[in-house]
Structure formats: structure tokens, C-alpha cells
Image (cartoon, rainbow, N blue to C red):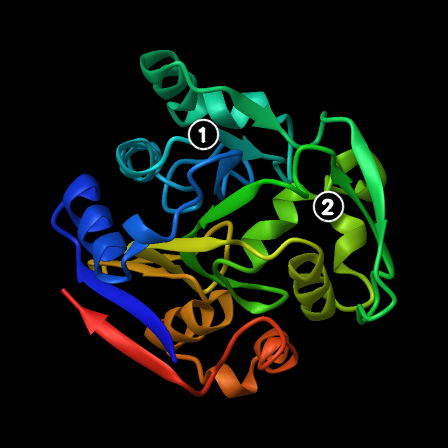
Amino acid sequence: MSKIAKVKFTGYEASVTRALDLIEATNKLPQTGLIIIKPNLTNADAPPVTTNVKAAEAVYKYCTAHSKAEILIGEGCGCGETMDTYRANGYIELADKYQIRLIDFNEEKATLLKNKDCFQLKQLYVPEIVPDAYIISLPVLKDHSFTVTTVAMKNMFGIAPAPYYRGSWNKSKLHSPSTHKSVVDICLYKKPGLCVVDASVALSGMHLSGTHRELGLILASFDPVAIDAVGSELLGHDPKTIKYLTLANNLLGSLDDIEILEG
């Protein structure tokens, strides 16, 4: 059974801590190696288009309190330059405050991986730093014009280096012929180890410009399919009608066997 923490938002540090405690993250975070916190900084716009820096700080502080692994923040933006998105949203100051290394997946040296079982991305370039890292997907809950919703799984598009997938925007080649299949394929190459979703203020209608919806929640889970399903329901969608979720069901997680832990 997949457990989803669903915690009332009272502030990032308190609510993220409560959500992660509910799913017993203290016992499951790696104690060695590398943890990469992966926010959604698709462009330089302010939250809720992008992940609030206070959410990243809360996850970082939780990890440092419960793990001896090295902890970085990584993103490869979809539009513009990643360092500009970091700068616009306060991540440079966060990095300076805690001496955190900020990674630009679009600029990192990449390696080519292959997987014949993927739906369409039979090979994928990923940064060399990614395969052995433990990635925490930290998105904002949003509707999406290509995939109905964008939550923990779609957030993993950021790991794909722009030089290999750039068209009219940095990751445009991943959206053809099927964005839904690409979402699943990228997670088959690198599934997030942990997902924390900022649903304090969600974005309804469109992922880059939509209506702010004050849901007042933080979600957390080790199952990206289950947390995307719960998030999609919060936005008013039936998860079983969303193609990337039905494709990922029983492959990357579960749509059906979900326990909600409220706090």
C-alpha cells in the first residue's frame, strides 16, 4: 500500500516536517552518497508557477537533520537559463546561506542511457551526476496543457539536458509525439526516491499562467504515481483518465492501493 501524507499548510518548515514524519522519511533517507532536491523552476516566474524557495529550504533542513549524505539542489529549466531561474526565485541566497551547491542539469556533462522497455524514449541523455543520486521531486501542484497535470513525475523533465532536447524551448523534443509517454519513460530512467508536493497554492488551468487555488496542503510520498493521482484529484481530475498515470500504474507505482495519512 502506498502512503500519502496530506498535511494542512501552516508554514513550510512545520508542514513539510510533519508530512515527512508521517511517511517515516527519517528511516528511509539514504545516509551516504548524494541527495538532489529537484524543485520545479521551469522558468524565472514567481510561485506558484515555480517552487517556493522556502519549500526547498524546509526539505533541505529535514534532510540535513536526518541524513549524512551530501545534499544538493538541481534543476534544468525549460525556458531561459537555469541560473537565472535560481537567481529570480531566491535560490542563490539559499545556497549562500547553507553552502549548498546548485546544479544546472542543462549544463552538466551527460551520459547516454538505453532502455528498450520504454514507450518512446529508448535512449535518454542524463547528467552523469543523476543515475546514482537519490532525487527528491519537489514540484508545485499544477494543471498542465499537455499532460492534464504536472506533479512529481512531470517534474523529472528537468533532468534531461537541454542541448539534446532543445527545440522551440529547452525540453520541447520530449513533448513529441507523446508527452505522456515521455513522462513515464523519464521516470523509468530515474524514478524520484521521494516526492514532496507544494499544494499550498496550486495553479489551475495552465502550468505557466493559470488561476491560483489556495488548497492549503503539503503532500509527501515515496510513490510518484500515487502522489500524482492524489494531486490530480485535488485539481478536480479523475486520475484514471490521465494517460501518463494509467501508463505508469503498476510500473512506477500504484493508482489503486493508496492510504491517506492526514495531519
Query: Dividing the image into 4 quarters, which one contains the N terminus?
Result: bottom left
Give me the residue at 50% from left, 71% from top: 225
Residue 19 at x, y = what percent?
23, 56
Let me know if residue 167 appears in the view: no
**Element on which disc 1 rests:** strand
- Name the residue nearer the viewer: 5 or 175: 5
**Element on which disc 2 rests:** loop
Instruction: Give the left or right position of residue 121, taking residue 251 as reference.
Output: right
In the picture of the structure, the residue carrying the numbered disc 1 is 71
To which quarter of the image does residue 8 belong?
A: bottom left
Q: CA distance from mark 2 to mark 1?
A: 25 Å
Give me the residue at 87% from left, 61% from top: 122
Residue 172 at x, y = what percent?
76, 49
Instruction: Give the left or right position of residue 126, taking residue 80 as reference.
Output: right
Q: Amino acid at mark 2?
A: Lys
Let me know if residue 261 appears in the view: yes
Work out whether 119 lies above or below 168. below
Label 2: few (<14), some (14–19) or many (≥20) C-alpha neighbours in 10 Å: many
Work out whether 140 lies above or below 170. below
Give me the residue at 45% from left, 85% from top: 238
- Name the residue nearer the viewer: 22 or 124: 22
- Name the residue nearer the viewer: 204 or 183: 183
Query: Dividing the image into 4 quarters, which one contains the C terminus?
Result: bottom left
In the picture of the structure, the residue carrying the numbered disc 2 is 171
Residue 154 at x, y = what percent?
58, 58
